[in-house]
Image: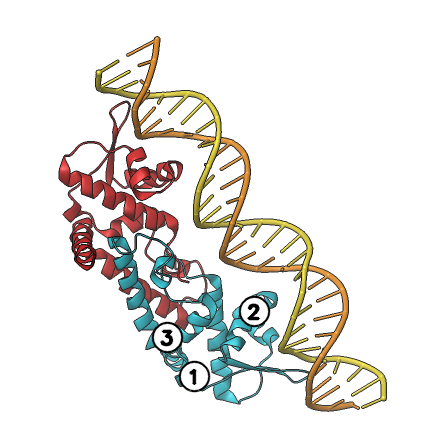
Chain colours: A cyan, B red, C orange, D yellow
Amino acid sequence: MIKLSTKGRYGTRLMLNLAKHYNDRKEAIILKSVSDEEEISIRYLEQIIIPLKISKLVKSIRGAGGGYTLARKPAEIKVSEILQALEGTCCLVDCVEDEDYCDRVNICATHDIWEKASTLLHDYFDKTTLQDLMTQEKKKKAKAKAKA
Amino acid sequence: MIKLSTKGRYGTRLMLNLAKHYNDRKEAIILKSVSDEEEISIRYLEQIIIPLKISKLVKSIRGAGGGYTLARKPAEIKVSEILQALEGTCCLVDCVEDEDYCDRVNICATHDIWEKASTLLHDYFDKTTLQDLMTQEKKKKAKAKAKA
DNA sequence: ATAATTCATATAAATTTATGTTGATTTATA
DNA sequence: TATAAATCAACATAAATTTATATGAATTAT
């Protein structure tokens, strides 16, 4: 499997969860709440949110009544930014990002297809925002409801 | 990083190497030769080639004078087949392949974007064959030579 | 017989994934 | 001002997976 790490997956769900509450009221959300709703260990979420904070995708409010909020509106946060913060890059292989990684780069045809594939992924994630995810989720829920 | 495993990377190079020699003469190629040319541990190649054999992408000839050959012409072997054999799937996340993996599938919007991204990747690798890679490599080498 | 080679398993090292612990720091609020 | 709630920080541990090497058995051409 070409693997998206749990950091990337959980981090995106974390951000989507913050996005949902961002719509309700702009209160700070505590990780415990995200942990309960998304069924992800709070200890792991604590590790995952650090790079999201460093990349200024979330803001933290310390102390009692504190928590986290999105730093920007859901429509202004791209999935590519989330993955960039968590995975470092959208590339499939090291040799795409770091040309010095392997001295075959200039003669290796496989390098080119991993690069092209990485671009396909990045372009897709770059045009998908948290707002898009919320819209999509509403659709899905309506569909699931209609089915029941 | 959305990571293509070394199995997938090395396995594709292994197949491309066999493809190159398939053109010369259709002799069996020993892994030692692939190991030398691609600078990949022969022990690791031995492990990687097993699933390729199981998926009938390569044929093995045992004993002295033996080795491996492609089971079909390079133009008839898709990169998607190689990755399928080595990675099990082209999917980015388990929940795309196995709907029972997570009970949120029907309400989770992130599932949908991983699925869409997986499809993008698969479609691309499905239209790329070993022959395409060889053509691409010739181009690259000519370019590198012209530059020098 | 011998040497070359695949085939099969075992082991080891590295990384990812996840949880646990302890405590410091900040801040709302009673 | 004391207390509780929450982030922040720095570890330590452990399970699972990936990556890689090691050893030897089985097969076959010469």
Residue A121 in view in this figure: yes
- Mark 1 residue crowding within 10 angstroms, few (<14) / some (14–19) / many (20+): many
Identify the residue position indicated by label 3 in the image.
Answer: A140
Residue B71, given in percent of the width and then of the height, sits at 20, 38
Q: Is residue C22 left or right of residue A141?
A: right
- In the picture, the quarter occupied by the N terminus of chain B is bottom left
Local SS, label 1: helix
Q: Amino acid at mark 1?
A: Pro
Residue A137, given in percent of the width and then of the height, sits at 39, 77
Marks 3/1: CA distance? 18 Å
Identify the residue position indicated by label 1 in the image.
Answer: A74
Q: Which of marks 2 and 3 precedes in the sequence?
A: 2
- Mark 2 residue crowding within 10 angstroms, few (<14) / some (14–19) / many (20+): some
- In the picture, the quarter occupied by the C terminus of chain B is bottom left
- Mark 3 residue crowding within 10 angstroms, few (<14) / some (14–19) / many (20+): some
User: Is residue B36 positioned above or below A74 on the image?
Assistant: above
Q: Which of marks 2 and 1 precedes in the sequence?
A: 2
Q: Amino acid at mark 3?
A: Lys
Q: Chain of mark 3?
A: A
Identify the disc placed on residue A45: 2
Asked if labels 1 and 2 share a chain, the reply is yes
Q: Is residue B121 left or right of residue D8?
A: left
Q: Chain of mark 2?
A: A
Residue A35 or residue B143, whichever sits in front? B143
Pointer 3 with pointer 2, Cβ within 8 A? no
Q: Amino acid at mark 2?
A: Leu
